Amino acid sequence: MNGKIQGIIIGGVVVAALGGTLAFLELTGKDPGGTEDSSSSVVSKAADDAEAVTLISVEQKDIQKVIVDNAFGGYTLERPSSGKSEFNIVELTGLNQSSVMKSGLVEDLASLEAYKTVEENTDDLAKYGLAEPETKFTVEFADGSSRSFRIGDVSTKNRYRYFCEEGKSTVYMVLSSVLNNMIDRKEDYVSLSLIGSNTDSTYGRLEVERKDLDYICAFEDIEEERALISSQVMVEPIFAHLNITTSSGVTHGLFGLSAAYCEKIFPSEEDWEAYGLNDPLAVVHYENETQNYTLTIGNEIHATDDNGNETDEVTAYYGYVKGVTGADCIWQFTADTVPWATFLPGDVTSMMTSNKIFDVNEVVINANGKTYDYTLSGSEAENSVYWVKLDGTQDITPGLFQGLYKYLLSCPTNEIYFEEAKGDPFLTIDINRTDGLTDKLEFYQDTSRRVIVAINYKPSYKIESRWTDVFISNIDRINRGEEVQDNA
């Protein structure tokens, strides 16, 4: 928020000769090495001791309007005729505006203060950048009076700008932070907060359509009793459980979404084309019973090097949000806040099955024509598998079977696949739950090093054959009473 000078503290117990030298250098604009300060050639005619000057001192309620004319076209801040205390920027009417910034501006102007007087009755406003300034503003008061001011160059003290009242020749220094909102764009007053948190109990459905993908990615809730880690699952282009550490930004990133910058207010069709929104990189649509949002992601914004040339690094994207009142703008979003522009399904999916071992009473494996029927019993509350039997007769050490099941859950799922598999599966795994539900996993040879995995008869992943080789060998290991091997 714009700061105010609350007091002037004048140091005085430094070495006298050094203090005198510094005071001389500041007044003459020279540095200690003897070179002239290039930021300004103005020689201050004010005394060494700064003395604050009150320029405006009124109650905030007495300010009715602020009219700004600057390099970006300016704006008008006015108190509504209804008498409400909330100010409105006329050019932004209909858009969500930052109440904090507007009230801060009015607060600063109501008690506007100069750091010091630079020169009284100057005959050369040009040397301060005040003859033809880029920024002027007028304050209108409740009694019908008004006062106008000019904002000039950055002063020899870089925290300040030269300043004068219209029609007068006394030059002051005013803190830049008090004046910046009148120098900058009106668009900076637009609120960057776009979508709030999701307070609904149900998740709904999120769809992501990408220019570089020939399928839609969709996410929905899963029945609570079948949720392993994430309460959401991918339902298109395949059914897959999610890795909560990598998927939350995709499934929940719209909630709490804020922009980094307001690029364009009230965009036209030409603006949509210019920013790549008519042929978007990605479109994200979310809907539940009470909410409906669409985020359109357009052109990339690249980082630049020291010479101002664009690099390959993408730092942000242009975007537009529908479904939010008061947000008719093209925005800039930092790349990390819009993961939908680059993520792939394999980045967010997790294990092939969500079945906890304690919810399973039978696992039937058919490997290369041989069947292995494991039955088991256990308790999640006691975190224990009580017993495991192979084909109803051979006792299997529970810890060894848990190792095999853990290896099953480690199956890599980073490469999705949804074309039809050919031939017959060389490996099938039926996971039967205690509640009567079943998941079926089928593995088809694709090439000598690649295997297609179908989940519940639907092709879903492509994995390296190394994984299935180790899985089949691990079956023999636990049957012999040996520890399983990992996929290293």
Image (spheres, rainbow, N blue to C red):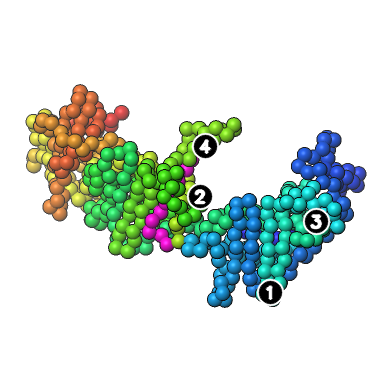
User: Which of the two marks, 2 or 1, is nearer to us in this view?
Assistant: 1
Residue picked out by circle 4: 303
Image disc number at residue 71: none
Principal secondary structure, stretch drawn in magenta: strand
Q: Position of residue 75 (x, y in %)?
A: 59, 59
Mark earlier in primary sequence (2, 1): 1
Q: Amino acid at mark 2?
A: Glu
Q: Amino acid at mark 4?
A: Ala
Q: Position of residue 171 (x, y in %)?
A: 80, 56
Mark earlier in primary sequence (1, 4): 1
Q: Quadrant of the C terminus?
A: top left
User: Which of the two marks, 4 or 2, is nearer to us in this view?
Assistant: 2
Q: Residue at x 22, y 47 (%)?
A: 355
Q: Position of residue 459 (x, y in %)?
A: 18, 38
Residue picked out by circle 3: 171
* SS of the residue under disc 3: strand
